[in-house]
């Protein structure tokens, strides 16, 4: 990985940049056959964090008829996750557009 590619990942490792946090507890059923948390679980954790952000932060500020849709998700697996454990999901808003939040 080049320095240019690594820079955004370093920025995402800075907990102070994330203003909204939610917690999840890892479950035994989240494990794969190697006793790691299965990669398919990570998007589920993101979904819980995203809902906490939408309902706790965005929903009170917008019309109830406005819908939110996930357009893109990207995952860079940097480390393994192990059971048992607790996961903190941070939400970072980079930009608010006329019809989107990045």
Image (cartoon, grey):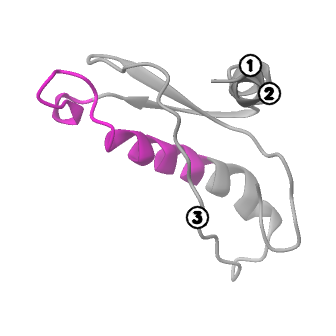
Q: Residue furthest front?
A: 2
Q: Residue at x 74, y 19 (%)?
A: 14
Callout 1 secondary element: loop
Say whether marks 1 and 2 touch (CB < 8 Å). Answer: yes
Q: Position of residue 22 (x, y in %)?
A: 56, 34
Q: How many numbered callouts?
A: 3
Q: Which residue is mark 3?
A: 70
Gap between marks 1 and 2, in whole Å?
6 Å
- The one of 29 and 60 positioned closer to us in this rendering: 29
Q: Position of residue 55 (x, y in %)?
A: 63, 56
Q: Residue at x 73, y 51 (%)?
A: 57
For residue 37: magenta? yes
Q: Position of residue 89 (x, y in %)?
A: 56, 33
Mark positioned earlier in the residue sequence (3 or 1): 1
Q: Which residue is mark 1?
A: 14
Q: Residue at x 53, y 34 (%)?
A: 76
Say whether marks 3 and 1 touch (CB < 8 Å). Answer: no
Q: Quadrant of the C terminus?
A: bottom right
Callout 3 secondary element: loop
Which residues make up the magenta segment? 27-52
Say whether marks 2 and 3 touch (CB < 8 Å). Answer: no
- How packed mark 3 is, by other alpha carbons closer than 10 Å (few <14, some 14-19, many 20 or more), is few
User: Considering only vertical position in the picture, is 10 above or below 38?
Assistant: above
Q: Which residue is mark 2?
A: 17
Callout 2 secondary element: helix
Q: Quadrant of residue 26?
A: top left
């Amino acid at each position: 990985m080049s320095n240019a590619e690594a820079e955004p990942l370093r920025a995402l490792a800075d907990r102070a940049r994330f203003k909204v946090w939610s917690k999840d507890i890892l479950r035994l059923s989240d494990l794969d056959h190697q006793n790691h948390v299965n990669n398919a679980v990570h998007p589920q954790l993101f979904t819980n964090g995203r809902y906490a952000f939408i309902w706790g932060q965005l929903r009170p500020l917008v019309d109830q008829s406005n819908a939110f849709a996930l357009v893109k998700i990207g995952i860079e697996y940097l480390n393994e996750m192990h059971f048992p454990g607790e996961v903190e999901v941070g939400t970072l808003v980079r930009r608010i557009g006329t019809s989107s939040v990045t």
